[in-house]
Image (cartoon, coloured by chain):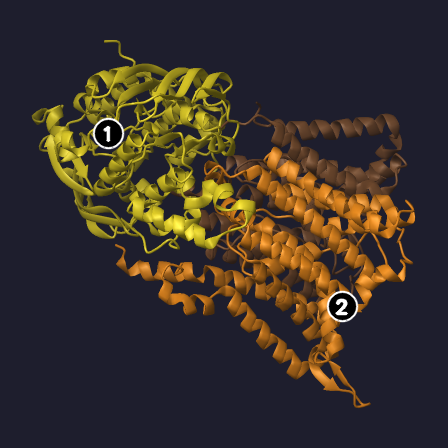
Chain colours: A brown, B orange, C yellow
Amino acid sequence: MNRYFREISVTIALGLVLLAMAVLAPGFFQPQPLLSLVTREAPTLVVACGMVLVIISRQIDISVGSQFSVCSICAGLLAARGWPLMLVVPASVAVGALLGAGNGLLVAGLGLPSIVVTLATMVILRQGLNLVQQGAFVNLPDNVQWFGLSQAVGQWTLVAAALVLLVAFGLAMRRIAAGRWVYAVGADAEAARLAGIRPQLVTFLVFVLMGILAGLAATMNIVQSPQVQPMAGAGLELKVIAAVVVGGVAISGGGGNVWGAFAGLLLLACVSPALTHLHIEAYWEKAIQGAIILLAVVADGLRPRKN
Amino acid sequence: MNQNSPSAGWKSVVLRYETLLLAVLVVEWFFFYHYGTTVNRKGVVVGFGTLDRQFDILRHSCEIGLLALALTPVILTAGIDLSVGSLLGLCAIIFGKLWREGGLELPLAAVLTLLAGALAGGLNAGLITRLRLPPLIVTLGTYSLFRGLAEALTHGAVTYTDFPAEFLFFGQERWLGLPTQAWLFLLAAIAVWVLVHRTTFGRSFRAIGFSPEGARYAGLPVGHRTGLVYVLAGLIAALAALIYTARLGQAKADAGTGYELFAITAVVLGGTSIFGGRGSVSGTLLGVAAIAVLKNGLACLPVVIRMNAAEEMSGMFTGALLLLALAGSILPNILSTLRLRPQAG
Amino acid sequence: MRHETAAPLLTLAGIKKSYGAVRALQGVDFELRAGEVHALLGENGAGKSTLINVITGARTPDAGTMTLAGRPLGELTPAVTRALGIACVHQQPALFADLTVAENIGLRLEGGGPWRWVDWRRRGQEAEQLLRRVGADFPANRTVRELSMPEQQLVEIACVLGSGARIIIMDEPTASLTHREQARLFTVVRELRAAGTGVIYISHRLEEIFSLADRVTVLRDGESVGTQAVRDITEAGLIKLMVGREVAQLYPPAESAPGETVLELKGVGCRRAGVRDVSFAVRAGEIFGLAGLVGAGRTELARTLFGLTPADAGEIFLQGARIHPRSASEAVALGVAYVPEDRRRHGVVLEMPIAHNVTMAIHPRVFPGAWLRFGAEEGLACQAIRDLAVKCSGPDAPGSSLSGGNQQKVSLARWLATKPKLLILDEPTQGVDVGAKSEIHRIIRRLAKEGLAVIMISSDLPEVLGMSDRIGVMRGGTLSAILPGGSDPHTVMAAALGQAK
């Protein structure tokens, strides 16, 4: 069985959907709406890259949505005070890194289960943000939206940035020793320890990186609209986890890559516009996304396994 | 693990996690009773200390409490079910649709809804046990699927209302002095308690949670028992849907959104290990109560009322409590490693 | 090529290590010179694995000193020992299933920081070379998941070869290798010795030790009982050192006359488990020993009989009735009991009390209507504790608080409680201290006397020879010979290795 079975099959599924759309509803391929769609998903892709790492290392981070919200609001408030984007982006990334480090300490340092830890930090961050912000939007100065450039240029910039990051991650995880360490830790922490890797440190850094990417994604999100909403990241965690799982990253750790997650994300993102163009009621979106997730895991379950 | 010497009997009772949680709950309750009860200008007692408020707490914790009950056996087997909140929504819609559009009698619609819940749980069960898929991912999929179906069935807009009074009785009235749904909740709690603590089913759940391979080698029907907990979770989620509908008098697609998180929090707070095996139904009940009292109590504190931050404060405190409970659960391990350290090298 | 006068490369003195109540090492002294192959020998549970874990830094010893080339060593971690040039071929390959062979080898070989750019093409070529050197014939871009057990073992060896370590530990490296691969490995080991590497070689196969090793250290019950030059010692002398007592008096004598046939296998096979065409019969009151090398298919056969990997060929008869257990619970209901090899993972649920463990396989009988009866359970548990002399603080003590031998007794008690017709024991005394071992032997004998049909899988050759009424020898997933009890060890070994005599 091919090593990249899942990545290839998801890509084929995506290709089939696009092909079907080309035949049934060519209107789907209008450039502007498509660009908007891809731009909207660009921050999600950045978060997904981090989630791939987290899940490969056999952890999970449910708090990414909240991290994303907190970073968005922080970045928004700073931008509203007139900070230039050059400073807002690192600040947001720093906030994200801090939040990620918190999770990392609890999970790697104390050995607590990541699913419960991040469940707790998700609620704490979300409600803490609500407490401070009371649901108020942050209005941004004009020069923030699309970096003060035209919409098209801004959109292309974001998409390009996300793609560069994707490629960088894809290469780094395969080519750089540290990338392989993450796989090793997720596959078998004890064997990794015997091979001279420090599993706790790797896990901690993976969570920090997840936070950094959430912070980066937050800035990529706020430049898309004149306002920042505090609920920006609500539900993001499940969307991202779904994309990553559909893309073939094994929840039991040690396997998968960002390319599959990329294909999975596109596949799930296509559902809503595809329904619109096929004149199917949009209410089916969630059900279809759920069905896609289940189909993907069932395909995994039916594959013959060694051992 | 000091459960081996009989002379430490009283110690093991006092030091049990549930006892500690009960103490926390009592302190919490009196704290809110003291600081959250006031007399308004007309000389009427308002706030936490009133009986009405206490009944309100009970009324509002029944649905999440039921989901927490449903999740206790699941988590005992080291599984998880993220789909219970969505299933609550789907079952509410199915119930409304059967009654309003299907023209069925309410009792029949209710029974069919419970069946639908068990069936949906069966879907989780089948995927998890037959195909050996990880519960987290399967139920993440059905989390989307169930909610999506609920939205699709109602086109995201239809809400079923105008239920007859005899049905609303179950959610809005009192029976024998207590809110009606509290009796149903109590019944469900006793049933789950018996199942978990007094039958071989509960014993198998624990064995599976501690060591699924060990349980299989002991000849326990692992697949069957694991499937059972998910079917049961579906059934209880359907019951929660009926109570939810009766309390609010309406069935809508977003019913129970986010409830799964509160339910999981309650279970883990109640001392059930997310790694499976350890835990109790009484702990879960205490966990539910601690969260419900916290939420309502905070809403009665003058400080919080002035800040208009009841929801936020209760969320943050619940999260912090969860982290504290987790840290507490590993404290013995940390202490024992610290004690062992000096001998090394 | 002997370096008799070479300075010691690695010296261990007074190493002690306990796991809870189990004292795995109680003062071990050991010395390894550069350019020697030093065999480490001992029965199962003598402390070899623990000693390796101490040397590789995977476990911290409770007491004792270690010196490397004259320099005292502080606290070791795997990373530190790797940097010091100590590498280990683990018995169970510690590989990452989803990574390719080249990536696995790379992970083990790369030193340095995390941000290095890895040249996978060069790594791939190096990996290919290493694989050729150990005689593997599969490409380095396969994922480990796709490899068989012996192939994984070769990768493990390749990893260690490539590390250029000055101390190489090999823990039963030949356990699952074919003859050709073994011969290749021996050549590699001799090359290493010639290059001045110190090799610690662990094996149960005495002939390997005599053909390969320069010196041998024998461990017994966590202590080193002697180091000798191989040319100065005979096979019998080694066995005496290992066992430390006369083999004959260790095993209780057979007292039972076998009765009617309980189990009969006709051409039983299971493709998934790699078992094929097994035929034999076991009678009531008989102990049927199953000998063979690790990976010969003995455990797999037991799992097939127990329904964990259902048979897909042949017929199984239990007391004359044809059975086909498809799951462990079906097998239990039919009267088959299986005391598994890995008691910590399969035999006992460590976190649960003894009482729960003892009744786990008999829920329907002790708890009619699924209703727990705590009194009856405690009674059963206490009886089991008394019958098998389990050393514990009571029926509520968790399995994890027991020593290995007592865990094994609890596992045994669980299966005796099912009142089985057929009892399969898989390595019943592995990792068990000497006292408990002979107790378990007496229990097995008593059970046979009471009319139970017993299949006993064991890698401990003296045990198989001393306990069995008849001995089945497995090789390559099938039964290669059935020998009478009390056969001489060489015949059994020959059958296990497939040497025609």
Q: Name the residue that disc number 2 marks.
A: B179
Q: Is residue C272 visible?
A: yes
Residue A156 to residue C21: above or below: above
Given the image, what chain letter belongs to the residue carrying mark 1? C
Task: Say what secondary structure mark 2 lies in.
Answer: strand
Q: Would you place residue C174 above or below residue A265 in this image?
A: above
Q: Residues within 10 Å of mark 2 (few under 14, many from 20)?
A: many
Nearest the camera: C232 or C456? C456
Residue A183, percent across and down? Answer: 50, 39
Among the 4 quarters of the image, the one containing residue B171: bottom right
Q: Which residue ends up furthest to the top in the rendered image? A: C501
Tell me: C112 left or right of C239. Answer: right
User: Which of C116/C462 is in front?
Assistant: C462
Q: Circle 1 is placed at which residue position?
A: C463
- x then y, percent, for residue C495: 28, 15
Q: Is residue C269 left or right of residue B44?
A: left
Give the quadrant of the N terminus of chain A.
top right
Q: How many marks?
A: 2
